[in-house]
Image (spheres, rainbow, N blue to C red):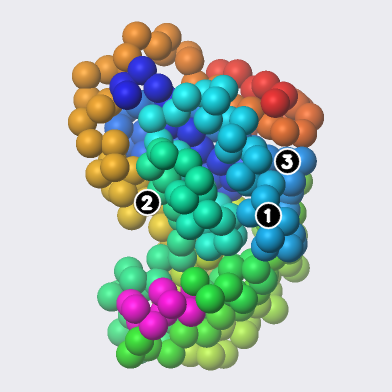
Amino acid sequence: MAEHPILVLDSGIGGLPYVSAVRSLMPAASFSYVADHAGFPYGERDPADLRHRLLQLFALLIERERPALILLACNTASVVALEALRERFALPFVGVVPAVKPAAHHSRTRRIGVLATARTVEERYLHDLVQQFAGECVVVTQAAGEIVRLVEESYGAPAPQAVRRCVGEAVGRLVEAGVDSVVLGCTHFIYLLEELQRLFGPGVTVIDSREGVARQVQRVAGNHYSAGRGGLAEDADSLYTTGRCSAGLESLAARFGFDKVLEL
């Protein structure tokens, strides 16, 4: 298993911060990252269509990359398709879901906000998470899917004024609701973590799921990557896009430790 990569997939660049979090715990692991730009944005797709797309895409990727395990680094894809993917493929899948449990643990006022895409907000999965881990809290959900395009089109570095225009209304609604913890329910939102924290102010803690997801990947992988990179070259990690390569994508990929960007 150690000679095989961890396969990470998102609709775009949203999953890259999760790669960094996993690398911090598992420096010997290798990675293949897939940005499904041809299917972007997942949050606007019909759930059945998205499940079908992901089942087809992973059939191709598993045969090609022969991964040790798969990190589905997208909240929307995880809530819509994770169960179907686990049923179809005999490989361990780790999904990304809103960090409702740590938010409930952290909250002093028992009022939590969830900022996510419309698809994640609407799915039963989020409701079940709230019932399981935050049943004693008031949970206010707010869709803000337009952030995804803003982050993707700016390669993770939108101008602060553009962020404020994009999310100001959503932030205002959550502040008015009196929440003291806000869960980022979309991987793309992590790129805006510092700006969002400034907008919410010191009385609100913004929480994401990177730490918990990285620990889960480490648990699932066990000690398979503890002895080194399995003979792979140090520059073996590759980022694939189902769209077109660009200088901006190559620059961002390099920041996250991927020396190659290839069209899939």
In the rendering, at what x and y percent does residue 132 appear?
34, 78
Which residue is found at the position 68% from the left and 54% from the top? Answer: 50
* Residue holding disc 1: 50
Q: Nearer the viewer, residue 247 or 244?
A: 244
On screen, 230 above or below 35?
Answer: above
Q: Identify residue for label 3.
A: 37
Quadrant position of the C terminus in the picture: top right
Q: Residue at x 31, y 22 (%)?
A: 2
Neighbour tally class for label 3: few under 14, some 14-19, many 20 plus, Cα within 10 Å: some
Give the foreground label among 2 and 1: 1
Percent across and percent down for residue 75 are 54, 58
Q: Is residue 128 magenta?
A: yes
Q: From mark 1 to mark 3, how far is it between C-alphas?
A: 13 Å
Of residues 247 and 218, which is closer to you in this image?
Answer: 218
Q: Main secondary structure of the magenta part?
A: helix
Residue picked out by circle 2: 213
Residue type (three-letter) at the residue carrying disc 2:
Val
Q: Nearer the viewer, mark 1 or mark 3?
A: 1
Q: Residues within 10 Å of mark 1 (few under 14, many from 20)?
A: some
Q: Residue at x 65, y 40 (%)?
A: 56
Q: Position of residue 126 (x, y in %)?
A: 49, 73
In this picture, residue 150 sits left or right of residue 121: right
**CA–CA distance in space, label 2 to label 3:** 23 Å
- For label 2, the SS is helix
Who comes first in sequence, dot 2 or dot 3?
Answer: 3
Identify the residue shown where x is 77% and y is 34%: 243
Name the foreground residue: 125 vs 14: 125
Q: Earlier in the sequence, mark 1 or mark 3?
A: 3
Gap in Å between the C-alphas at discs 2 and 1?
22 Å
Asked which quadrant contains residue 64, the reply is: top right
